[in-house]
Amino acid sequence: MKRLIQLEELAMTAGAIYIISLLDLSLSWWVYLLLFFAPDIGIAGYLAGNKPGAITYNLFHHKGIAIVVIITGLGLQNDYILLVGLILFGHASFDRIFGFGLKQFTGFKHTHLGVMK
C-alpha cells in the first residue's frame, strides 16, 4: 500500500510540474527549481519550538491550502497566484513521496502519516 500511495503522490507532483510548464511566465528554469523548494521555509518555525514549527510547516505543506490558492489564481485569472498554488501542491506531494507528512505538535518526526524513522 505504501508504494501505491508513493506512486499517487508522484503522479500529483508530475501533474503540478506539467501544469506549471504550461504557464507562460517567461521565468528561467532555475527560478522554478528554487520556487519548488521554497515551501521548506516553513521549517524555520521549529526555531521557536515544536508547536510553532508544526503550524508554519503545515501552512506551507497543506494540500487544502494549495487548492484554495490554485482556485483563487484561476478565479482571478492570475498566473502568478496559480503558480504559487501549484508549487505548494506539487511540493507537498513531493514531500509525501518520502514520508514527510503534516506535522503534529509533538515533534518534527510525528506526522499524519505516522512517526518518521
Image (cartoon, rainbow, N blue to C red):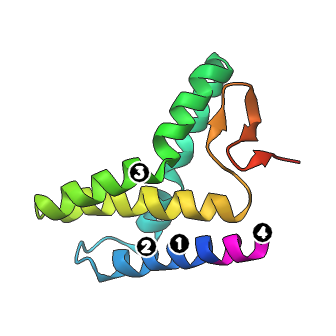
Can you identify the residue that label 1 sits on? 13
Can you identify the residue that label 3 sits on? 64
Does label 4 or label 2 sit earlier along the sequence? 4
Amino acid type at image mark 2: Ala
Q: In 3D space, how far apart are the residues under numbered discs 2 and 3 (Cα atoms)? A: 14 Å
Contact between marks 2 and 1 (CB within 8 A): the answer is yes
Amino acid type at image mark 1: Thr
Classify mark 4: residues with Cα within 10 Å, few (<14), some (14-19) or many (20+): few
Q: Secondary structure at mark 4?
A: helix
Contact between marks 3 and 1 (CB within 8 A): the answer is no
Residue 74, position as x, y percentages in the image: 18, 64
Q: Is residue 78 visible?
A: no
Q: Residue at x 53, y 60 (%)?
A: 91
Residues rendered magenta in the picture: 1-7
Amino acid type at image mark 3: Gly
Q: Residue at x 56, y 63 (%)?
A: 93
Q: In 3D space, how far apart are the residues under numbered discs 4 and 3 (Cα atoms)? A: 22 Å
Can you identify the residue that label 4 sits on? 2
Q: In 3D space, how far apart are the residues under numbered discs 2 and 1 (Cα atoms)? A: 5 Å
